[in-house]
Image: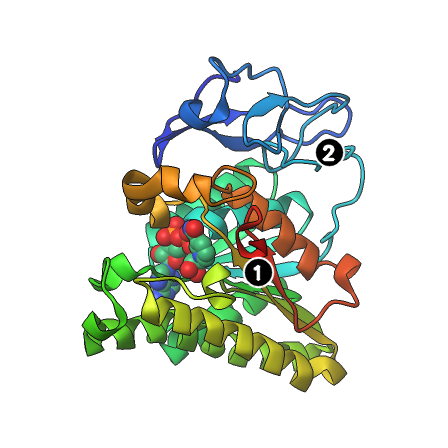
Amino acid sequence: MNVPGRNLLGAALFRLPPATASGDQGGWSMFDTERSGLDQFDPAVVYRRTLTGVLEPAQGVTGAVRGGILSPGHEREDTMAGILDGKTALVTGGGNGIGRAAALAFAREGARIAVADFETDAARETVGLVNASGGQAISIGGDVTNAADVAAMVNGAVSAYGRLDCAFNNAGIAPHQVEATGQLTAEWSEDSFDRMIAVNLKGVWLCMKYEIMRMQAQGGGAIVNTASIAGLIGLKRATAYVAAKHGVVGLTKTAALEYADDKIRVNAVCPGFITTRMTALTREQRSEQIIAATPLGRFGEPEEIAEMVVWLCSDRASYVTGAAYAVDGGWTAM
Ligand SMILES: NC(=O)c1ccc[n+]([C@@H]2O[C@H](COP(=O)([O-])OP(=O)(O)OC[C@H]3O[C@@H](n4cnc5c(N)ncnc54)[C@H](O)[C@@H]3O)[C@@H](O)[C@H]2O)c1
């Protein structure tokens, strides 16, 4: 027991310690030897991620911690109720990166999840991780640019769990995925521009459209859209990405105004540079430059975005709507 599992996206998968008193099954967590700062992972120890990004043993944590390695400052007794206990959530782009980390964090906090992704195998893999951590999840395929697919995502979540309390509209693509790597504004092709807007802007609007109709019918809910620091400031060589992400912030604010009376809160999270496959090329080409320009001096982890998302979806954020929160290591403060 408690031995390295299998390779997954370049990281090893480890079983965290089984529960003592609570009866939980223990959790699975990603452990990357290169980034962790540890020579060896001790499966008998629960780790927390420090503000500098390395792992260290978490003091005073007993029993299983559902969802894996703790994020900075996030240490709670496993016996405490999750902040999303009893709620249901839809996560788009849940097959990888930030969406996967969010699905695991939703589960850790007690929500049942529908993991939607274009890449159905990746969505299923996330479901496997959630289930292995003691959570409950289903996977749904589909393209967020297609209205019928999006309706099916929302209907799938509602069929499985009876209601939709939280939605994390996170599916997205980067310029290199529309063949626009390094291109300046006048160099983008019309096809690249259209595809970027279709996925990163229209996709979010379509998701909100069907989620809002459902949430209105059931008396409320919470939506979080993934924007970016590119939704708050300009970034060179990413013109349609920046336009789409500014659009996501605009959609977020407008829907927040329109549906406040329906008790639907709508917010956006604006990640900085996060270690997912989306930034693999960027990290290869200009890691040092980005780290130097980030006040906290490192890339962020997907789990650190997930913390903001679960909080925004929870009742603890009951007075928060129409906001766009930067989780960027201080990038936009400069
Ligand atoms: N990684 C970063 O540094 C960063 C920074 C700011 C914002 N973001 C945003 O965060 C979100 C998640 O990015 P990530 O870094 O986790 O990337 P990722 O590539 O790891 O994950 C994105 C997921 O979205 C899915 N997806 C893409 N197009 C889709 C479509 N049309 N329909 C359904 N699913 C689709 C992909 O299959 C993938 O699983 C994106 O919206 C991205 O723009 C990322």
Please name the amino acid that badge 1 sits on.
Val
Q: How many marks?
A: 2
Q: Out of 241 and 214, give the one closest to the viewer.
A: 241
Asked if residue 321 lies left or right of residue 212, the reply is right
Asked if residue 153 lies left or right of residue 122, the reply is right
Q: Which residue is mark 2?
A: 75
Residue drawn at x 25%, y 67% is 184
Residue drawn at x 47%, y 17% is 3
Circle 1 sits in a helix, a strand or a loop, which is it?
A: strand
The numbered disc on residue 269 is: 1
How far from the left and from the top, in percent, is residue 21? 78, 24
Q: Please indicate, yes or no, whether residue 275 appears anywhere in the rendered image.
A: no
On screen, residue 70 above or below 254? above
Asked if residue 123 lies left or right of residue 185, the reply is right
Asked if residue 202 lies left or right of residue 317, the reply is left
Q: Nearer the viewer, mark 2 or mark 1?
A: 1
Q: Quadrant of residue 81?
A: top right
How far from the left and from the top, in percent, is residue 190? 21, 78
Q: Out of 148 and 299, give the one closest to the viewer.
A: 299
On screen, residue 173 above or below 252? above
Residue drawn at x 27%, y 42% is 285
Circle 2 sits in a helix, a strand or a loop, which is it?
A: loop
How far from the left and from the top, in percent, is residue 76? 76, 35
* Quadrant field for ligand 1: bottom left
Question: How many residues crowd around disc 1 within 10 Å: few (fewer than 14), some, or many (20 or more)?
Answer: many
Q: Quadrant of the C terminus?
A: bottom right
Sooner in the amino-acid sequence: mark 2 or mark 1: 2
Q: Quadrant of residue 187?
A: bottom left
Please name the amino acid that badge 2 sits on.
Glu
